[in-house]
Image (cartoon, grey):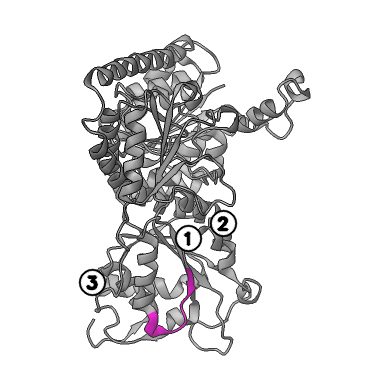
Amino acid sequence: MSGTSLTVAEALLLRLGNAGVPYLFANAGTDAAPLIEAYAHFDAEGIGPVPQPVTVAHEMAAVSMAHGHAMATGVPSAVFLHVSVGTANAASGIMNASRQRIPMLVMAGRTPVLADGSPGSRDMYIHWAQESFDQASMVREYTRWDYELRYPRQVNETVDRALAVATTDPAGPVYLSLPRELLAASAAPEVDSRPPRSGPAATTTAEASAIDRVADLVTRSGNPLIITNSLGRDSGAVASLVEFAEVAGAGVVEVFRERMSFPSSHPQHLGFDAALVIQDADLLIVVEADVPWFPQDEPAPDVPVVHIGLDPIRRDYPMWNFPSRIALGGCPARTLEALTAGVKGRIAGSSQQHRLRRLAAQHEESRAGAWHRAEAANSARPIDPAFLSRLIGDALTPDGIVINEYDAHSDQLELDRPGSYYGPSAVSGLGWGFGAALGVKLAEPDRTVICTLGDGAYIFSNPLACHLAAEQLGLALLVVVFNNSSWKAVRTAVRRIAPNGWAETSGNYPLTDLSPSPAFAEVASACGAYAEEVDDPAELQDALERALRQVKGGRQALLDVHTT
């Protein structure tokens, strides 16, 4: 492009492409016109590299697809939203990405500033009412950085700055607003050719003296317990945790699992409920777990609690008051490796072997209990979620990936490979799972992807937009809807607040009924998917096998399973 005049939109796309941004997920509005023209120009003349444009018919689905792709690859994608209204539609997705530390460049058009007849200026009815006083304020609390492009010559440095902030730990979404007339303006020649002026900051490591203090606690402990839920965001950190747990003789619990952070079959894996084992521990090591337990399960005051994580005190949470004797900030993998070195050889061999035998027995007990629960419910109608989860786990191939937005039970899924499980953000912006699964499949086209959703999560996912994207991109995955025709989590909350109250004793739970359930299988089949409705547990295994054969053959599939 040397010596050629570019528009700002063209310069922007080239800069993103040169930075290695693979996709631009977009639900285009009138503000995207300069970008669409830029793509058409580049397609006609074979100019690139630029991010591959992906049409997604709802902003929540677009952000969730970018989220899923970045989860699987660690590489940020870009999203383009339609001014203020598109930003509002995407807000829940941006919140999810923020809490899960997903690097992402979220761009949104800005209503044209000018109304003077110049290219890109106001020429439509919507161009007055859509303008906000502060458009970025809608998502500012959940982004690492926000900015509005002001001059054509800023394109390179603005993109570089945005990506550097998005990918620096703790990573997260950044927000860039783009006035339409600026996108249509001419940019400086050769604006795409300069190398990036900045990149992400290097990761940090906890202080050696603090690591030594924790190593001493581990050495003196008789029953250390590790609690984690999202360490697996860094797939390499899983091996570091396994090595540390083995050297320390510590049991491991994955609570509210967001990523596969410790292999399910490992003999020191003690399940997914800290409340069952926390009172027996004399040392708690919390590794990238924002809510390690509920207040009613709080350990005794004299039990030391250590937190390990990129931000172990959760500075972006307004209130976070879990006990913490020592907090080790910085790269968790490096911290765990340093702790392993500090503990290795300091625990007597006989004591170590006794610990490991005890943990292995607990592991087998936990595993047997989970499997018994599923087997005991193998004929229940409606179908029990534990039994459905068990059959999904049995059907998974070794390369399988589960994206779960309720109600798959982790204790029924034998997952040992990093990157084999992705769960929802704790902020719970519902509707994330389907779009995220599409992004994961886009990143991992040769792996079997199963997306498990509650019926409410499926409704919130904008299923027509997601099925359409799957069909357009040829993304063959299996969606399993755990359909209980209700807001099950809300009913559970009512029981906790009033266990013997009016709702529980009468069976009347206003505001939670989602019946009559829509014909989800018909929705999916209308979009080209293979789809079945299943209400008989005896037919469930065969239905899963049929659906997975369709997926293997290159077709998306959905099972609408009637559950409790």
Mark 1–mark 2 distance (CA, rounded to whole Å): 11 Å
For residue 136, the mark is none
Q: What segment is highlighted magenta in the picture?
A: 146-154
In the rendered image, which residue does mark 2 sit on?
Answer: 89
Q: Is residue 161 above or below residue 517?
A: below
Most foreground residue, 153 or 184? 153
Mark 3 surroundings within 10 Å by alpha-carbon count, few (fewer than 14), some (14 through 19), many (20 or more): few
x and y percentages locating residue 249 in the rendered image: 30, 25
Mark 1 surroundings within 10 Å by alpha-carbon count, few (fewer than 14), some (14 through 19), many (20 or more): many
Residue at 47%, 53% in the rendered image: 98
Regarding residue 206, the answer to whether it shows in the image is yes
Q: Nearer the viewer, mark 1 or mark 2?
A: 2
Residue at 36%, 46% in the rendered image: 210
Mark 1 touching mark 2, by CB under 8 A? yes
Most foreground residue, 296 or 14? 296
Residue at 57%, 21% in the rendered image: 564
In the rendered image, which residue does mark 3 sit on?
Answer: 46
Q: Is residue 159 left or right of residue 45?
A: right
x and y percentages locating residue 302 in the rendered image: 51, 30
x and y percentages locating residue 178 in the rendered image: 48, 74
In the rendered image, which residue does mark 1 sit on?
Answer: 27
- Based on the displayed image, in which of its 4 quarters is residue 2 positioned? bottom left
- Marked residue nearer the N-terminal end (1 or 2): 1
Q: Amino acid at mark 1?
A: Asn
Mark 2–mark 3 distance (CA, rounded to whole Å): 34 Å
Mark 3–mark 1 distance (CA, rounded to whole Å): 24 Å
Q: Amino acid at mark 2?
A: Asn
Local secondary structure at mark 2: helix
